[in-house]
Each structure stands twice: as C-alpha cells, then as structure tokens.
Amino acid sequence: MSKQIAVFNANAAQAAPVATIAAAQGLKVRAIVRDAEKANAQNKKENLTYKTADLLEKSQIADALNGVDAAFFHMPVPTDPTHPAIWLSNFIEAAHETNLPLLVFSTSGPAGSDFPSTPMIDGTSAVAAAFANSGLNVITLQPAIYLENLFVPPFVPRLHSEGILDYPPVPKHFKVPFVSHIDQAKIAVAATQRPDLAGKYFKIASKDPIDGDALAEVVAKWIGRPVKFDPLSPDQFGTHIGQLFGNAEVGTGLAGLYKSLLSADKSAIHIDTSELEKIFGVELSTVEDHIASWPRL
C-alpha cells in the first residue's frame, strides 16, 4: 500500500511542488488548502486529493492529519500577528492527538544560532525550536534564500523594464546560497520517507552559490535582454519593501535578515549539497539550470 502524506498550504509556492512531486512518485497526497472544493475542480491529478483545513481550527488540522504517514508543513505568511502562535499550538496539539508518525518542517529561510540575532531570525528560530521540543518526530529543513524571489515583482521592480537587477541586497561579489522550491520539494518528499532522520536539522540549497554579476548573466538569458547587477543595501531594500506594503515592520525584518546573512560566519552559509544528495537520494540542480528552465515572462 502506498504511503500517504499530508501537505499543508498545498496551493502555496513552497508546498505546491512538494504535493506535485510526491504524487508523481506514487505517494498518496492529501493536499491541505483553505478551499478544497475549488482546488479539486481546478487541479485533478492522480494520487492527489485536496482537503479543507483552517489552521485556526485545531479539529480541522487533526482531521487533515488523521491516518497519514507523514506531513509537510511551513508557516504561512500571516495577515494577523496573533495567528502564528495559534497555528503553531494547534498544529502541535493536533499532531499529538492523531499520533502523527513524522513531520517534515521547513523554516522557510535562515534560522538558528549560526546567524546574528534579528527579529525575523529569532522568530523563525523560535518556531523551529518549538517543533523540535514538541515531542513529535520532526525533520527540520532550513532553506537558503529562495531563488523564486526573482519572480516577485516588488523584489525586482526594475528588472524587466530597465534590465537592472537590484536584488538580492548583497555586495556584488558575495556568493548567495539560493534554493529552488523544486529542490526543496525533492528533499522534503524524500524526508517524508525517512523516519530514521527524525530529530535532525538540515540546511538545504540548490547547487553552487552565485554572486550578483554571475546571477545577472544568467537572468539576462532568461528575460532575453542585458541585465546589470546594481544591488540595494539591506536598509534600502527594507525601506522599499516597507513603503510598498505599507508595513515598516516587514521592511525592517527583511533588512535585518540580509544583514544577518552578510555578517554570519562563512560556515553558517556553507551548505554541502553533495552530502544532501547522498543522504536523501536526490539529484539537485544548479541555480543556472533552474533559471534556464523557467518560462520567459
């Protein structure tokens, strides 16, 4: 009998590839969303069924987890600052009530004591610690910076109109460890089949960190026009995002994240992708290969 996994936030950018890859590998996927009826009507796929659950409702989480062999979870972006604590508490309690065998949790970005303290780092680290100390069997994945941020217009406002890449907010020769949602999904799906790795914490990335000038060359091939890397500083980037979304706290948080990344010890941002491939039995791709596979916008 095929194993069944629950994938939460399954219509979101991070989790959707997890659901798709797991289903393609023959796993039975219970894709958890806010509107299952709509998702099932729009996305009919073999081995994949959508189910409704609201993270504010513990009983719905328990229903979503009931009978599965593993679950993949990451914290959604909140619209209400009180929600994350409720989501976290509800999920942990529901997982215990249903005797969830294995949880694969993504921190969605850098976290932990390897990075200098910032509000965003500290908040993410606290969630990871809560899961690690919850008594559940948890495999924690700590992704590097998401490569798909290049799809987010506010992050690259001048790219398509002017050929200026001012993201990520790092010096030109700083090699950034990126991870694609696809590579994260490959590792996450493999992790759901590895209960022997419960209790372990893995930093994950796609192959070959890349500096700004090299990234600009690769992006130029993607968008079909010359591109120059002219980065903002972390503070400039944070101010831009804060003003755009009308939320200075979000901007300050992102500025602090990149400052922490830049000031961390080199060992904090070094990720041995060959070891990841060996442990999880997957083949990861380079940043260049991922971007080369993207459709032109």
Image (cartoon, grey):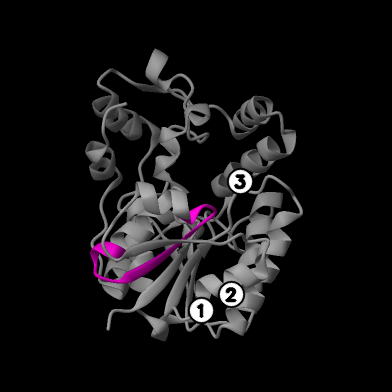
Q: Is residue 282 above or below residue 155?
A: below
Residue 44 lies, in percent from the top left, at: 31, 54
Q: Amino acid at mark 2?
A: Ala
Q: Amino acid at mark 3?
A: Leu
Question: Which residues are the magenta region?
Answer: 23-36
* Disc 3 versus disc 2: nearer the observer: 2
* Disc 1 versus disc 3: nearer the observer: 1
Residue 256 lies, in percent from the top left, at: 65, 43
Q: Amino acid at mark 1?
A: Asn
Q: Which residue is mark 1?
A: 66
Is-magenta flag for residue 29?
yes
Q: Is residue 59 above or below residue 168?
A: below
At 25% from the left and 66% from the top, the residue drawn is 282
First-in-chain label (1 vs 3): 1
Q: Which residue is mark 3?
A: 257
At 35% from the left and 67% from the top, the residue drawn is 189
Q: With 220 as the anchor, is 95 left or right in this view?
A: right
Residue 1 seen: yes
Q: With 123 as the anchor, is 42 left or right in this view?
A: left
The image quadrant where one finds the C terminus is: top left
Q: Residues within 10 Å of mark 2 (few under 14, many from 20)?
A: many
